[in-house]
Amino acid sequence: MLFQSPDGGICLDVKLERETVWLTLNQIATLFGRDKSVISRHLKNIYSSGELDRKASVAKNATVHQEGTREIERTIEFYDLDAVLSVGYRVNSLRGTQFRIWATRTLKDHLIRGYSLNEQRLRQQGVEMRQMVELLSRTLTNHTLVTGEGRAVLDVIHQYARVWGLLLAYDEDRLSERPARPVLPEASLSLESAREAIIRLREDLADRNEATALFGNERGDSLAGILAAIEQTFGGERLYPNVQMRAAHLLYFIIKDHPFSDGNKRIGTFLFLTYLDQNGLLRRTDGSVRIADNAMVALALLVAESDPAQKDLMIRLIVNLLDEPRPSERNTENPSASGSP
C-alpha cells in the first residue's frame, strides 16, 4: 500500500503482511524525519525495556545487492506497526499520528471489514476501464498515434477488455495457475548480463544512428536496485511469486524510474523481452510471440504515460497480456456465438 503524508512531503511503499504493516529502518527514519541512528537507538530501548517482543515485531527480508562484480545477499529488517508507533511516541512526530490514522484505517478496510466480492468486482471493472480509456486517449493525443502504432494501442486495450475473468482470478490469487508454466528453470537477470545486453543494444542502434551518446548511461545504482527489487523475498517468500509478475515489474520500474540518462523505454522493453526469453516465456506453445512488436511499442508507451497511482493497473495489464488463453477461451471476442446477450 502507498502512504503519502497530507502535506505531500513523503511517500512510502508500505508492506501489508500478517495483519499489520511493515516499514524498514530507513522508511521509519524518513517517516519521522530523524536520523537512522536516532531511530535505531529508540528501537533498541523499546526492545531492551520489554515494551515489545522483538521476535514478534520484526521480520527479516533477504535482498540481493550488487557490489562491484559480486552479488551480495543482505538481510533487511522490517518493523511492524506496534514498533513504528512506539518510536513515534518517543519522537513526538505529527507524521507518526498521521501514519497511525492511515494504517488503522487501511488495516480495518482491507483486513478486518473487507468488501463484498461482487461490489469489489463491479467497482474494479468500472474504475479500471475508465482509467484505461482515459490513458488511451492521453497516449494517442500526446504521441499523435494515428496509424500503425495507434492501432496497436487500441489492440492492447481491446485485448485487455476481453480478460476480465483473468483479472478477477488475479484478485482471488488464482492467476498464477493460468499463465503457461516456464519451460526452463526460473532464471534471474544479473546486473552483469543486463549491462552486456544493453551494450549490444546500444552498439546495434548506434550503427543505425538511432542512439545518442547518453543512451544506456546508468544514473547511480538505479539499475542494480531494480534488478534486486524484482527478485526480493519477504518472510522467506518471493515478493513477486512468478516470472510473469517479475517481468511486468521489471518493465514498469525501468520505464517509470528512469535509471538511464536516455533510452529508458527501449532498454526497459529490451530487458523485459530478454527476461522472458531466458525463462522460456517469450513465445507461446505454438511458436508465436506472446506480444507482437507493435503491441510491445504500445505497451511501453502506455506504461510511460500512466499515472503512478495506476501502477497496479499497468502490472495487471502486462501480466494478462503474457497469459496464454485456453482453447475454449479463444473465441470470447464474439459473445453472441455462445448465446450470451
Image (spheres, rainbow, N blue to C red):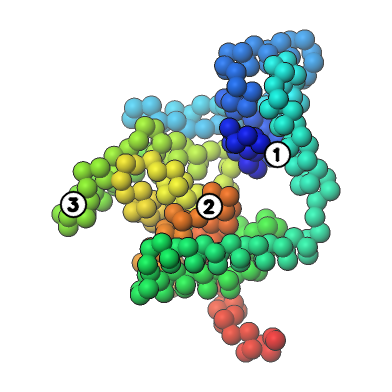
Name above or below for residue 212 compared with residue 318.
Answer: above
Q: Amino acid at mark 2?
A: Asp
Count of numbered circles on the image: 3
Q: Position of residue 173 (x, y in %)?
A: 67, 55
Residue 339 on image: x %, y %: 69, 89
Q: Is residue 115 left or right of residue 312?
A: right
319 or 183: nearer the eye? 319
As measured in the structure, the alpha-carbon distance from the residue carrying label 3 to the one carrying label 2 is 32 Å
Say if 312 sits above or below 329 in the image: above
Q: Looking at the image, is mark 1 or mark 2 earlier in the sequence?
A: 1
Mark 2: few, some, or many residues within 10 Å (few <14, many ≥20)?
some
Query: Which quarter of the figure is the C terminus placed in?
Result: bottom right
Circle 3 or circle 2, nearest the eye: 2
Above or below residue 272? Residue 231 is above
Residue 175 location in percent, x, y? 62, 60
Precedes in sequence: disc 1 or disc 3 = 1
Q: Find disc 1 in the rendering and name its residue.
A: 17
Of the residues under marks 3 and 2, which one precedes in the sequence?
A: 3
**Cα distance between the residues tagged 1 and 2:** 26 Å
Secondary element type, mark 3: helix
Residue 254 can be seen, yes or no: yes
| Viewer-nearest residue: 210 or 142 | 142
Identify which residue, 163 or 4, lies in the foreground.
4
- Residue 71: which quarter of the image? top left
Q: Which mark is residue 307?
A: 2
Amino acid type at circle 1 is Glu
State whether residue 28 is above or below residue 162.
Answer: above
Which residue occupies 63% across, 16% down?
Answer: 39
User: Is there a contact, CB below 8 Å, between mark 1 and mark 2?
Assistant: no
Residue 206 tag number: 3
**Front label number (1 vs 2):** 2
Neighbor class of circle 1 (other Cα within 10 Å; few <14, some 14-19, many 20+) is: few
